[in-house]
Structure formats: C-alpha cells, structure tokens
Image: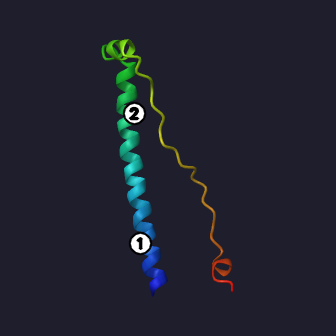
Amino acid sequence: MQLQAAWNETEEHEEQVSAARRTYNASVMSYNNACEQFPTNLPAGMMNDSLKAYIEIPEERQNIDARELFAS
C-alpha cells in the first residue's frame, strides 16, 4: 500500500515538472520569436539579446527491474 502511494506521488511530481517544462518552453518560444521578428528584433539586437535554449528531455525511459530494487 505504501509503495502504491509513493508511486502515485512520484507520478504526480513528474506531471508537475512536465507542466513546468511546457510552460518554460512556451515562454522561451515567445521570447525567441520576439528576438527574431521585426520590429522587436531591433531593440533586441541593440541590447545583445540572444536566443534561449529549450529544456529538452529525452523520451526514452529505462524500465525499472523491481526484483533488483527489492533484492536482499
């Protein structure tokens, strides 16, 4: 029962991190577009603003071997 509760809590945290990453990446996309499009690219160029990087997480996930986790 405790393992299931911990698992659910971990999934909830992963969802929150994923939502925060999506929000950050949307903000970066908006900022980068403003830096590249006329007329906002003019003041961005004068202030030496540069494009920002997205947060990218590889989609491949490793399966966890439960036997190894609980081996004595």
Point out residue 2 in the picture as x, y percentages from the top left corner: 45, 85
Q: Amino acid at mark 2?
A: Met
> Is 29 drawn above or below residue 49 in the view shown?
below
Q: Tell me if mark 1 has few (under 14), some (14-19) or many (20+) residues whose alpha carbon lies within 10 angstroms of its own.
A: few
* Of the two numbered discs 1 and 2 in the rendering, the one whose residue sits closer to the viewer: 1
Q: Give whichever of discs 1 and 2 has the lower sequence position.
A: 1
Figure quadrant of residue 32: top left
Front residue (pair 33, 50): 50
Provide the secondary structure element on which disc 1 rests.
helix
Point out residue 54 in the picture as x, y percentages from the top left corner: 47, 38
Point out residue 45 in the picture as x, y percentages from the top left corner: 39, 14
What residue is pinned by disc 2?
29
Kindly identify which numbered label has been placed on residue 9: 1
Q: Amino acid at mark 1?
A: Glu
Residue, x 58% and y 50% (percent of image)?
58
Front residue (pair 32, 50): 50
